[in-house]
Image (cartoon, helix red, strand yellow):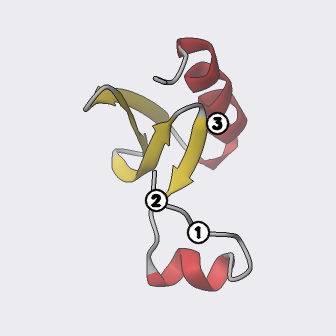
Amino acid sequence: MASSKEFVEYAAEQLRLTGTIRCRRMFGEYGWYCDGKFMGVICDNQLFVKITPETERAFPDVPKAPP
């Protein structure tokens, strides 16, 4: 199931305080960017954050799953 435009807009609105959020269609779903930097994807109306050493330290207990 592809993500709805409404969910993508909702997710972008929730992230707006972190910087300039932009979502781009890619591979039938969406990639999301903060201040021009790729940060993750939105698939099946779920937000996925790219795992980096920094996000791993910031969110060590958050469950991980493939998009």
Residue at 27% x, 31% y is 26
With 51 as the anchor, is 36 left or right in this view? left
Amino acid type of disc 3? Arg
| First-in-chain label (1 vs 3) | 3
Q: CA distance from mark 2 to mark 3?
A: 24 Å
**Disc 1 residue crowd, few under 14, some 14–19, many 20+, Cα 10 Å:** few
Residue at 48% x, 37% y is 43
Point out residue 25 in the picture as x, y percentages from the top left corner. Answer: 32, 25
25 is higher (above) or lower (below) than 20: above
Q: Is residue 6 visible?
A: yes
Mark 3: secondary structure: helix
Amino acid type of disc 1? Lys
Residue at 45% x, 50% y is 67
Q: CA distance from mark 1 to mark 2?
A: 7 Å
Residue at 56% x, 25% y is 8
- Report the front residue among 3 and 22: 3
Q: CA distance from mark 1 to mark 3?
A: 23 Å
Q: Is residue 34 visible?
A: no
Question: Do residues under tags 1 and 3 come within 8 Å of each other at their CB atoms?
Answer: no
The quarter holding residue 12 reads top right
Q: What label does residue 64 carry, if any?
A: 1
| First-in-chain label (2 vs 3) | 3
